[in-house]
Image (cartoon, grey):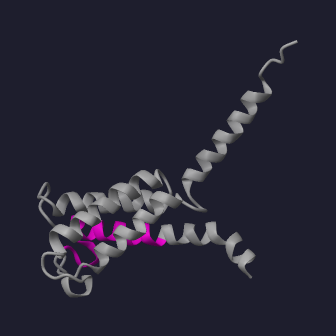
Amino acid sequence: MTGRLNSAQPYALGLFRIVIGLLFACHGASTLFGVLGGADGNGGTVDAGTWPGWYAAVIQLVGGALVALGLGTRAAAFISSGSMAYAYFKVHQPEALWPLQNGGEPSAIFCWAMLLFVFTGSGAFGIDRLFAARGERDEDKASDRTPVAA
């Protein structure tokens, strides 16, 4: 049983990455474009350039899309995780100690999920893996063309 679960791990991680990335991107899209209820729940948006809301929304939209695609996953997840840590400690934590009390559960969960991707990478189904496979093939071809010394 453990062997089967271990062999499915990259696929489970890949699906988890896609879901978390899409959810994260949806938060950014709602804040920037007013879709899915918008920033205020009534279709509102934040003004361009306002600190920290607009910048957080851009990180959420771009970082979430990159994580969902599995493109530059580790870097995008690192920046996204940091933005959610900032959101939790500067916006939510001063209101109350626990995330359940201060409304910071999404920030805390996204922070830790994105931090997981920093260490695990994209898993299966990511564009990162396609580039890695292509790089390995190119290295194999280059080694085939290396002249042999007599």
Q: Position of residue 119 (x, y in %)?
A: 49, 59
Residue drawn at 39 percent across, 54 percent down: 76
Q: What span is colored magenta in the figure?
A: 19-39
Q: Is residue 44 visible?
A: no
* Quarter that holds the C terminus: top right
- Give the number of callouts: 0
Residue closest to the eye, 23 or 52 = 52
Q: Is residue 118 left or right of residue 123?
A: left
Residue that extends furthest to the right in the rendered view of this protein:
150
> What secondary structure is the magenta-colored segment mainly?
helix
Q: Quadrant of residue 37?
A: bottom left
Q: Quadrant of residue 50?
A: bottom left
Q: Position of residue 16 (x, y in %)?
A: 51, 72
Residue that extends furthest to the bottom in the rendered view of this protein:
101
Q: Position of residue 14 (x, y in %)?
A: 56, 66
Residue closest to the eye, 122 or 115 = 115
* Quarter that holds the N terminus: bottom right
Q: Compared with residue 77, is residue 88 higher up or lower down, i.e. above or below?
A: below
Residue drawn at 41 percent across, 60 percent down: 65
Q: Is residue 132 left or right of residue 52?
A: right
Residue that extends furthest to the front in the rendered view of this protein:
97
Q: Position of residue 66 (x, y in %)?
A: 43, 56
Residue closest to the eye, 16 or 65 = 16
Q: Is residue 122 left or right of residue 139?
A: left
Residue closest to the eye, 35 or 122 = 122
Q: Is residue 137 magenta?
A: no
Q: Is residue 43 visible?
A: yes
Q: Quadrant of residue 103?
A: bottom left
Residue drawn at 68 percent across, 41 percent down: 136
